[in-house]
Image: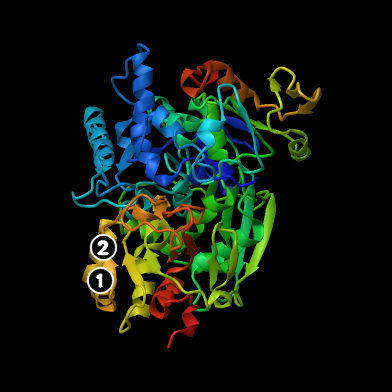
Amino acid sequence: MTITEKILARASGKTRIQAGDVGFVSVDKVMMHDVSGPGVIKVLSEWEQKGKKLDHIWDPNRVWIAEDHFVPAADKVSAENIMILSRWTKKYGIKKHFKYGLGQYGICHTLSHEEAMVLPGEVYVAGDSHTNTTGALGAFAAGLGHTDIAYVLMNGKIWLKVPETMLFEITGTKPDYLMAKDIILRIIGDIGTDAANYKAMQFSGNIVKEMSMDERLTLTNMTTEAGAKNGIIEPDAVTESYLRERTNASYSPILGDTDAKFSELLTYEIDKLEPTVAKPFSPGNVSAARELQEIEIDKVYIGSCTGAKFEDLQAVARILKGRKVKVRTEVLPAAQSIYIKAVREGLASVFLEAGVVIGPPTCGACCGAHMGVLAEDEICVSTTNRNFPGRMGHVKSKTYLASPMVAAASAVRGKITDPRDIS
Amino acid sequence: MSNIDTDVIIPGPYLKIHDPKELAKHAMEGLDPEFPQKVSEGDFMVCGSNFGCGSSREHAPIALSQLGIKAILAPSFARIFYRNAIDGGYLLPIEIEQQTLGRIFDKDELEVDLNQNKILNLTRTESYVMMPFPKLVAKIVEAGGLIYYRNAEEG
Ligand code: SF4
């Protein structure tokens, strides 16, 4: 069995399962945020209105809450949603509610690893499609909607179809101008945005083994853009030391069997891979950054669960140090802890001196919600993960998805730029 | 049209809204702002593959079902949209064959026969196959959604 199959087998109390099986599995952790949370709470209260009483939820210690999409409250409705969440977590005794403006908080998929909310071998479901991100820790992590999360909150389990696994072997020697973002954009460009529908995408190979956790998280984050149910990387020494810096909690990791069956095996030799950009309006519409170097841009956005982790900000700072940006540029660290580190380690002053605005951790403009959305025809290079029409603002705005290095280099030149081409 | 994503079905700024009637006013706004006026109770949508890709927002099937849409016929669906539609009991995501797409036209009158896994085109007196729902999914559909589904096996 693959790691995904083995995790789901353990969670369903079976010794053997295989891709295609449909059944219920026990959940270890569940998360909802300020967009999915009020929707879930609505499902629960409608159920209560039918005469059922919900005095307690399944396990308050396994539930956690993030405020990320519309914080700081973008308007009255968002402010009310945040209040709805606070009242609900108080009522049901949920301690892990990361509140905006109250210590650690940030984008949900960033907190899940920064705060070690999820551990290797666990089944983690959450009310957000990029839940796949957390699979980089060696967990089964998948996104669900409101009704499904409401069901988990009541019963501690959910039905799933065991996915087939596509294995991506990433090998070779990584040039220093290349980031995980370039690799995953190339993969989505090759396989297409629905190639992994209902499937797991697993990453291995020497490049993945050598990658830091922050870089691994970029790979799994964008498996959602290929339609995958989950992205996953087998836990190893990198996982262990990453988690040990953050938690004492014990866990029992799972590895796939050596004779596991994969639906596809794709090998990527990345020595010659170029910095890669996804053009509007699909994450699969990719080109080499150099082919787009004449495109003038209006703005650079460095944010989101994909592209504002600490190492993403370090990559940006390496390029911006001693330089000035030519177009409006925003950096929104993905969590308060990352923001603090950026201040302590001098990144924040590099950004400010380069002319960049630093914003509070939030999903903000990544989903076109607030805090810097795009105007009609505005062109943005962004470290986020989606560039559908209207995703970051006006339906006629244009977003080019890129690595933090490409984004920073583009900010310096005012045009889409390969990091090798800045002087 | 393929790859209709949830940002098109219900754009990001409306995610803070949870009232189905309000959401319905903005359904498909990213593609056709007039869409809500063009559909009525009992309508089906016939779409290209990978319908509903993108975010996990349950707002998408809620908005469409509030407009009266009962089923979406497409060669394939993005997985979260599919689950949300079924588990929330909003509408039926029905997988059809790619070639069926070219046989159905705007305003054709359709009927779905879940017992025989068939779609009847009353206008053209034709019928097409649909992918049967997996057993568990069919039971959830019958129950009217996951919350109402109770099964001895799963306690
Ligand atoms: S940062 Fe963007 S992709 Fe990540 S959770 Fe927020 S809206 Fe979703």
Amino acid residing under circle 2? Tyr
Q: Position of residue A160 (x, y in %)?
A: 55, 34
Reading the image, the residue beneath label 1 is: A348
- Identify the mark at residue B139; answer none if there is no mark: none
Residue with the mark numbered 2: A339
Q: Quadrant of residue B113?
A: top right
A340 with respect to A31 (left or right): left
Q: Nearer the viewer, residue A169 or A423?
A: A423
Tags 1 and 2 in contact by the CB under 8 Å rule?
Answer: yes
- Name the side, left or right, on which A208 lies relative to A346: right
What x and y, as percent, mark residue B116?
Answer: 75, 19
Amino acid type, label 1? Ala
Cα separation between marks 1 and 2: 8 Å
Q: Where's residue A145, x and y in %? A: 46, 35
Element on which disc 1 rests: helix
Q: Is residue A192 above or below residue A94?
A: below
Q: Residue A380 location, x and y as percent? A: 43, 65
Camera-side residue: A189 or B52?
B52
For the N terminus of chain B, which image quadrant?
Answer: top right
Residue A25 visible in the snapshot = no
View extreme (left): residue: A102
